[in-house]
Structure formats: C-alpha cells, structure tokens
Image: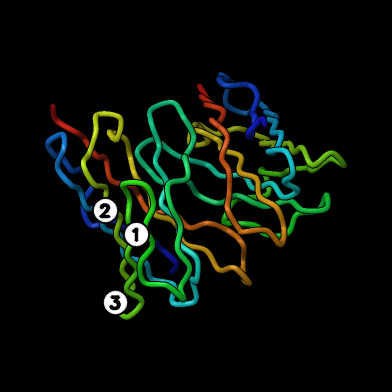
Amino acid sequence: DAGVTQSPTHLIKTRGQQVTLRCSPKSGHDTVSWYQQALGQGPQFIFQYYEEEERQRGNFPDRFSGHQFPNYSSELNVNALLLGDSALYLCASTRQGGNYGYTFGSGTRLTVV
Amino acid sequence: GESVGLHLPTLSVQEGDNSIINCAYSNSASDYFIWYKQESGKGPQFIIDIRSNMDKRQGQRVTVLLNKTVKHLSLQIAATQPGDSAVYFCAENEIQGAQKLVFGQGTRLTINP
C-alpha cells in the first residue's frame, strides 16, 4: 500500500520564477494538506484541499496556490519565488470522517537562488 | 496566537535509557495531539496520538501523557535505541475545527552508544 508520494524530491529555481509541486495521497485518503518546513523549524500549514476545493488556509500570501484533482492528487504552485521560499514542502493526506491521522510524504526540497 | 512549543531543543541520552520529550501548547480548543518523528531527509513519521478525553496512551516503547490543566504534552520513549535518534515534533489539532496541524519547533534526540 503506497504512502504519500511527492515529486520532485529536489528542485532549484531562480528568484522570480514559478514552481509546481505534486502530491499523490495515500490510498483511501481524500484530503490533502500542504506544509512548508524551513530549516530547523516545524512544518507550517499552507492550505488543505478536499473535494477539489481549498477548505482551510494558513498565513501564506496569494503567491501560494493549489489544486486538487478528481483522483485526490494535488499540486502546490508558488509564483514569483523569493529566496525565503526555500524550504522543504510537505504533503500530508488523511480521510475525512476517519481517525484524523495524517500521513506525510518525504517532501520536496525547494532551493531558490 | 496559536503555537505549540517545546521546552528543550536538544536532548542526549544513553542507549538503553528512557527519554522524555516535553511540549507546551497554547490553544485550549485543541482536542487531538500527535507526536511525529522526523529523520534527516524524510517527512514526519507518526509515532502516537492522543485525544483530549484521555490523559495517557501507550504504544510500543512509547507513552504520551496529556495534562490539559497546564496544557502540557510529553512523549516518553523507553529503552532508547540508536534508531530513535531524530527530531521529534508535537502537533495539535481541532477535530471539529480548522483541521490543520500546528507544530512546535522540535526537539533533536541523540542516542549515545
């Protein structure tokens, strides 16, 4: 049973560029959340998608946007990249109405230069 | 503001000893708490969780204690092994609320041989 898979694993972008990160949830899960983890810090909630809609959002600017597809997979898009966007981006999935456990992927390491 | 903090950023223990990692949370509406283990280059891995209607829960070599009066959470790891070396995060959530995990900064646990 595959867990949460994220791609790519590593990415280097130039300031001002745009990036798209991808996530496939664990089998049986229908809700996807994205987190940003800066070096030496705990993950920070970006937003959550369920039924192809953004349900919750953390304190992140509109440069951060997302999408969920009918197969429950999700994308995170970041526009106009800043150096401070360099971080590990984590995807977590869960199932609505389940035991509320969240399964995390291994993340995408984004470096903005 | 909402925050989940940890008292000790680093903790070193001898192999075979017991370790205790502490966490303070500030959102009195939180009713679900999770401990995660994160190894280098990986995403957070679920260790154990507890709901607010409990004050203790045991797993294999791990025990979580919840004191709602002082908003304190702890993770006890018995008979530590080298593989327990990692960063440990506590996270809080409101089951009927925002459905987002709020993480603390983390504690780096090092097991000395």
Q: Nearer the viewer, residue A90 or B11?
A: B11
Amino acid at dot 2: Gln
Q: Around disc 2, counting alpha carbons within 10 Å, would you say few (fewer than 14), some (14 to 19), or many (20 or more)?
A: some
As drawn, B91 above or below B32? above
Which mark is in front, 2 or 3? Answer: 2
Q: Which mark is residue B86?
A: none
As measured in the structure, the alpha-carbon distance from the residue carrying label 2 to the one carrying label 3 is: 18 Å
**Regarding mark 3 in the picture, which secondary structure is present there?**
loop
Horizontal side of residue A70 vs B38, given as left or right:
right
Using the image as rendered, state which of residue A23 and residue A103 is in the foreground.
Answer: A103
**CA gap, disc 2 and disc 1:** 6 Å
Please state the chain letter of the residue tagged with numbered disc 3 in the rendered image: B
Q: Position of residue A21 (x, y in %)?
A: 67, 30
Assess whether mark 1 and mark 2 are in contact (beta carbons under 8 angstroms).
yes
Q: Chain of mark 2?
A: B
Q: Is residue B58 left or right of residue A21?
A: left
Q: Earlier in the sequence, mark 2 or mark 1?
A: 1
Residue pictured at 50% horizontal, 49% vertical: A44
Q: Which residue is mark 1?
A: B64
**Of the residues shown, which amino acid type is indicated by label 1?**
Val
Residue at 44% x, 67% y is B2
- Residue at the (60%, 49%) spot, across then down: A46
Amino acid residing under circle 3: Val
Residue A106 spot, x, y in % from top left:
53, 30
Residue picked out by circle 3: B70
In this figure, which residue is indicated by the disc labeled 2?
A: B76
